[in-house]
Amino acid sequence: MPEKNRIRVVTTLVDMDGDEMTRIMWQMVKEKLLFPYLDLPLEYYDLHVKHRDETDDRVTIDAAEAIKKYGVGVKCATITPTADRMREYNLKQDWKSPNGTIRAILDGTVFRTPILVKNIRPAVLSWKKPITVGRHAYGDIYSGAEMRIEKPGKVELVYTPGGGGEPLRQTVHDFTGAGVVQGIHNTDASISSFARACFTLAWDRKIDLWFSVKDTISKTYDAHFRAVFDREYEQHWKDKFAGTGLTYFFTLIDDAVARLMKTEGGFLWALRNYDGDVMSDMVAAASGSLAMMTSVLVSPHGWYEFEAAHGTVQRHYYRHLKGEETSTNSMALIFAWTGALRKRGELDKTPDVAAFADSLEKSAIETVEAGIMTGDLLAVAEKAPGNRKVSTEAFIDAIAANLARKMA
Ligand code: NAP
Ligand code: MG
């Protein structure tokens, strides 16, 4: 497309590059699908594991700060260093997960939505529309305290008031033998911002909100989550939702799971940290492939970070390094970009940018529906004579050709 006809993105987008196979695809997506059509101001942060190491992970913090400044960022998958990775890349330290660092700075809730295509039937046959899982990304067992109890003895919960006063005590268990014990927490501030993020996303996408916990058993902890959601609804959303057909639906988690198997989908399911961790993987697996799952971090302050839910696809990268052809799926990475562009268009009030995001998504979906797909999809797609497995690059090229027709 000639320079002057390119669609102008008004505000800078924060571009966070990553590692391995996704880094290779990141470059291709930008070169082949975005730059030809967009006048796109990017602020580039290289989160390659080696660059994080060289900057003592400063680059990750800078990237998160840039999202605060501009509002929207898009992130490639990154290696979370482990002992193996430290040896592989000769790292100074096992730096924290970039996602964890960014989440800690932006605060917020992670929403995961599968990308549905006609020729990949979800394992749950009634699902017609995507189910978005909203996972509370703070507290509970992810910052819990645990103890192995070796011998008989009493374990208590003790709360010592900060300003002095009598401690509150409650017996957890009187052990007569060995066992295990766990203490978890959450805060009103975090639960409230979780609730607000969920209602905001449901409102943005015009989908119903389901929320479920086990408040029949956990009459203080889970019941408090429910009370916070109920209050958020009553105070800020009930009137807004009225007349739009949107609903807020609380139900016990067991009931939600049972109902899930019979619904059409098309709603947001908000869950506590562990429930969301587990259920988002179940929804992803039931929807086809990990590479068909998008993810967005929505901060209560109005910042957004879009990414693919999968990792760096290390095994494919090693094959690529050996010179073998790969067939790695770039759908979720492409949808990270379209999600970010659509949000940018919405915030900047530039509908042509959002329309471009729609066209690109359509081009990608139609490519798969035409039978041109990567290996992961071919394995789960309905059998059809036109189906063929293509390489990582050929898949992106096919989407590019489709997009070119639409943009002509
Ligand atoms: P992964 O990268 O998600 O890949 C796991 C397997 O899933 C792959 O080996 C591949 O299966 C399949 N897969 C995932 N994405 C695919 C795609 N786009 N196209 C085709 N197949 C795909 O997880 P991992 O191998 O456990 O982790 C690798 C690295 O990613 C780790 O260093 C981890 O720290 C990092 N990670 C980063 C993030 C993030 O940045 N958000 C998230 C998770 C993991 P087959 O090999 O069977 O084809
Ligand atoms: Mg999980």
Image (cartoon, rainbow, N blue to C red):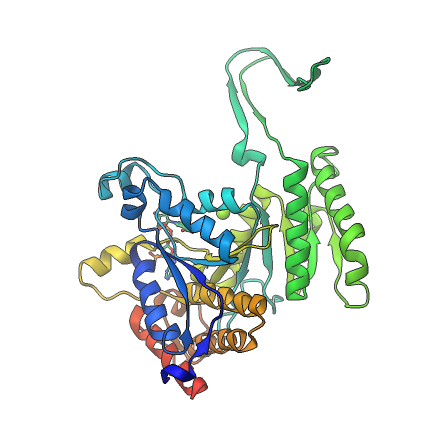
Q: Is residue 116 above or below residue 284?
A: below
Image-quadrant location for residue 12: bottom left
Quadrant showing the N terminus: bottom left
What residue is shown at x 38% (from left), y 66% (from top)?
330
Image-quadrant location for residue 210: bottom right
Q: Is residue 51 left or right of residue 67?
A: left
Q: Is residue 197 above or below residue 90?
A: below
Image-quadrant location for residue 126: bottom right
Q: Nearer the viewer, residue 238 or 287?
A: 238
Q: Residue 149: horizontal and vertical position, in percent?
A: 52, 17
Name the residue at the bottom extreme: 408
Q: Residue 32: horizontal and vertical position, in percent?
A: 34, 74
Q: Is residue 104 left or right of residue 56?
A: right
Residue 321 appears in the picture as rendered: yes
Residue 262 appears in the picture as rendered: no
Q: Residue 391: horizontal and vertical position, in percent?
A: 29, 71
Q: Is residue 122 left or right of residue 191?
A: left
Q: Nearer the viewer, residue 136 or 376?
A: 136
Quadrant showing the C terminus: bottom left
What residue is shown at x 39% (from left), y 47% (from top)?
60
Q: Is residue 349 above or below residue 249?
A: below
State the count of labels.
Answer: 0
Q: Residue 207: horizontal and vertical position, in percent?
A: 67, 64
